[in-house]
Image (cartoon, rainbow, N blue to C red):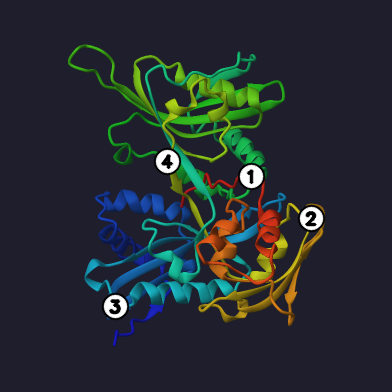
Amino acid sequence: MSPSYPIRPISPSELPQFARAGEQAFNSNWPAEEFLKLERMVFEPSRSLAAFDGDELIGSAEIMSFDMTLPGGNTVPTAGVTGVAVLPTYRRRGVLSSLMRKQLQDIAAGPEPVAALFASESAIYGRYGYAVATYRLFYHFNRAEGVVSAPLDPTRLRIVEPAEGRDRMRSVFDAYRLTRPGMMSRNDGYWDLKLADPEWIRDGASPQRCVLAEDDSGPRGYSLYSTKPDWGSDGLPNGKLFVNELLGLDLTATRTLWADLFSRDLIKEIEVRSRPVDDSLLYLLTEPRRARPAYRDGLWIRLVDLPAALTQRSYSAPVDLVIEVTDDLLPANAGRWRLRSGGFLDKATCERATETPDLALPVSALGAGYLGGTRLGTLAAVGIIAEHRPGAVAELSTAMWWDPAPWAATSF
């Protein structure tokens, strides 16, 4: 039998021990004091959990508080799960499971009906009711391959220090995030963290740089990027450019920001990190395959309060069916529910039901479809969802699907 290890929130003075668990588990080599400076910008002690063996902190998990945009433009309080780690010498003893179960119980007792995370290993979190709800693309261009097709309209571009452009970037981000499901709010601490840019995390690249796109109405977009200069033995430039974030509120700003980065001199390769799967860039390029898109999972979603979560979002089409949900960790979610909505402009309801279910599914399947980016028919095809009434899966999948595709630009 696995031993039981006490779990509790930590005090601020215990943060070095807390961070050590993550450093060991993730095989990191960050400078401890410098890392703690960054961690303190966003750390919420009351939302931390640590497992102990005597005085030794052996496992960690924490939450960052966000508001997440849902299909239809509403936002929902969301527990951003991060910092989940167990010391290598305590693996396979039930420490992680105890932390995850305790954390879910704590979230369920609070105001957040949804939890979300980015998974370091995709095999871990399905057992706790999480499922992939967003995907993201990564690009790799070689020299002169990023050619934007249409002629550019005049948009003013201005290079600024990231700290100087912070308020303008924030206004663009806050406007953009309400247009796409999966986008998370960013508080002052998160912006401090994003723009901190210490030398030890750059891996030889330049400081982070910022370009603002503006017109007479104000800021319309921005890019955050860094460069890594290099020269080959033949004297030719081998520099790299890393696009960390690029957001535009209109086509002109978006197109002009991309054209600016693709035209930089002395650059051999451009790497673009985390873009939506329906990224407009792929339709602006003269040769889209030159982007070499790599498709990866993004945000994992867990419904904590099922009826509250399902009634916060909008639905693309009318839906009226009874779903039978299994949830081994949060029994309040389990059972039969009747989900009804008249479509986009109609407020959804989700109430307990006794009728014969139209379909049966685990809570993780609802998490997968929650932001509108997963076709539930695929989950039914592999046996995750069982259809009891013909057409029920298509009805629910159509109602939950959303345009634009969900994307989580805020990592945590």
Residue 343, disc = 2
Where does label 4 land, which residue?
A: 196
Q: What residue type is labelled 3?
A: Arg
Measured from the top left, where is residue 408 in percent x and y? 54, 47
* Residue located at (29% from left, 77% from top): 93
Instruction: State how far apart marks 2 and 4 are (Cα).
Output: 43 Å
Q: Can residue 39 be seen in this view?
A: yes
* Residue located at (19% from left, 12% from top): 234
Q: Is residue 313 left or right of residue 275?
A: right
Q: Quadrant of residue 255?
A: top right
Residue 69, disc = none
Labelled pair 3, 4 in contact (Cβ < 8 Å): no
- Single out the residue that lies furthest toward the bottom: 1
Q: What residue type is labelled 4?
A: Ala
Measured from the top left, where is residue 269 in percent x and y? 35, 24
Where does label 1 land, which residue?
A: 180
> Helix or strand or loop: what does disc 2 sit on?
loop
Q: Can residue 112 be seen in this view?
A: no
User: Does label 2 or label 1 sit earlier along the sequence?
Assistant: 1
Q: Which of 407 and 321 is in front in this view?
A: 321
* Residue located at (61% from left, 24% from top): 253
Instruction: State how far apart marks 2 and 1 are (Cα).
Output: 18 Å
Instruction: State how far apart marks 3 and 4 are (Cα).
Output: 37 Å
Q: Nearer the viewer, residue 260 or 196?
A: 260
User: Does label 3 or label 2 sit earlier along the sequence?
Assistant: 3
Labelled pair 3, 1 in contact (Cβ < 8 Å): no
- The number of discs equals 4
Instruction: State how far apart marks 3 and 2 are (Cα).
Output: 47 Å
Q: Which amino acid does label 2 sit on?
A: Gly
Q: Which amino acid does label 1 sit on?
A: Arg
Please rate how many residues cluster around mark 2, counting C-alpha atoms within 10 Å: few if below 14, some from 14 to 19, many from 20: some
Measured from the top left, where is residue 393 in percent x and y? 65, 62
